[in-house]
Image: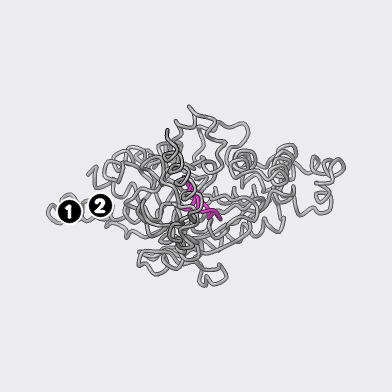
Amino acid sequence: MNTRSVLDWLSNISDIDHQPCKRPDAPSRKRRRPLTPDSTNDNNDSMPTSDDDASHPHKRHNAADDMTPRPTRKRIQTVRSESDYSLASPSRDSSASQRSGSQSPRKQFHVLRLQADGIIYRDLPQFTNKPTGLRSLLDSIDDGMDGNGIIPSSQQPSLVKAARDYDEFRWAARGNYYFSDNRDAVGQTPSVEDVLRILDNSVECSAGQHHEDGWNKFVHAPLLELAFHPRGERVKDQLVSFTSCVHASIISDYGTRSTAKKVDFCIYINPSNDRTPSSAPTVPAIKRLIHQLPRKAFNPTDFVPLEERPIALSIETKRPAEGFDGAKLQLGVWQMAHWSFLRHLMDMQSSSESARSQELEQEPSLAEGEGSGRRLQYPEFLPGIIIQGHNWHLVITTFNGSQTTFWQKVPIGSTDDTKGIYKLVHSLQVLRNWVDKSYWPWLRGLILQGDTAHNS
């Protein structure tokens, strides 16, 4: 290389070194924040299936997969975080600025309140003229929350001994009103050992700052076992039971994609375990009805374990002091879908009843022994539960034929002390009895009313 070439080369290097760094046009403030990344698959609103969890157990270590949807301070979108909170259903290529400002539950409350088939949130003291069934339910829970009769008299000796052995049970030696001969009529009461195990696990989850899935696994599910699965009885034989349903999604016919929400547990009815003599046709009737229902499921979700097992009430869980508004939004939208399913089912049965009436008018002989069909009515209310760490709250929803009202909230027990655990089990069993004695007879009657026309 000649000298001139070398000088030219050096000159070029010098020019480059001394050029001011050219900066791109300054982006807006919103553009400097990381954009929400695209999902790795097309189904942004769905969780991994149960099979996925079984074959890839390490996935459960992902906190975003383990938790039900909640607001997040970061703009990174996880499988069940901000994507589930948007009512606007933005496209994948929407900018972060288009999505920001529309994610908070409070703003979604406003949007839902303005919809003709939306939901209104109210405090329970505003609920005047409560139906008789709701008053009775609340009275029973309130009685238990006062500590009255939350333990059977047969367990008093073991509780008095526990009061001597454990500080956590000293309250049991200070009042006879905790004990009742009628407690067993509500349901089976857990033992001292059962209650201490729940307490220890609950304290561990709180002190150890466990994720939501830890609370669900070690505290909430075992406590539901105590309330719904009596010792000495087969789980498979229970009429009213519970299941985890973190992967269950709302069927689009009952709720739009933009309001897709998920909950943690469902209390359901197993019709095949109904021993009532008149209930024999119920299971065949459900099997026929599911062929007329969206996604062939007798529920607002096509979650396979619940396809033929009607949901009675649902439970949303959160960690301590975490997002109660988010829990209200999730459970509220889920309850809207529940009411929408019932409305769809009632419309189906009403059409079947109308067709039957027309047949009777054309063939009077068929009407012999037939009474006029009863008027179909919605249930008076549907309960739900929100768990926030140790504390469990009952909420109520009502329906006027188009819009849902969400009434909050009544404490039903807690897991941070032994007395609170006894109260909680009692409250859950009061709710179980409501399902058994009130909700299921109503739903069974609705199922069989339409089936009468089918079999005629």
Q: Position of residue 416 (x, y in %)?
A: 72, 49
- The answer to whether mark 1 and mark 2 are in CB contact below 8 A is yes
Q: Which labelled disc corresponds to residue 360?
A: 1
Q: Residue furthest top?
A: 55
Q: Residues within 10 Å of mark 1 (few under 14, many from 20)?
A: some
> CA gap, disc 1 to disc 2?
9 Å
The quarter of the picture where the C terminus appears is top left
Label 1 secondary element: helix
Q: Which residue is situated farthest in the front direction here?
A: 3
Nearest to the observer: residue 8 or residue 53: 8
Our reading of the magenta stretch's main secondary structure is loop
Q: Residue at x 48, y 43 (%)?
A: 10
Residue named by callout 2: 370
First along the sequence among labels 1 and 2: 1
* Kind of residue at disc 2: Glu
Instruction: Decide which of 429, 10 is in the foreground and name it.
Output: 10
Report the colour scheme. Answer: one colour
Place of residue 415 in the rendered image (x, y in percent of width and height, measured from the top left): 69, 48
Visible in this render: residue 212?
A: yes
Q: Quadrant of residue 371?
A: bottom left
Relative to 128, say whether 193 is above or below: above
**Could you tell me which quadrant the N terminus lies in?**
top left
Name the residue furthest right: 164
Q: Who's the residue at 27% across and 41% down the image?
A: 291
- The amino acid type, in three-letter code, at marker 1 is Leu
Q: Residue at x 55, y 67 (%)?
A: 124
- Is residue 262 rendered to the left or right of residue 255? right
Q: Give the residues in magenta.
A: 69-82
The residue positioned 71% from the left and 55% from the top of the image is 148
Q: Secondary structure at mark 2?
A: loop
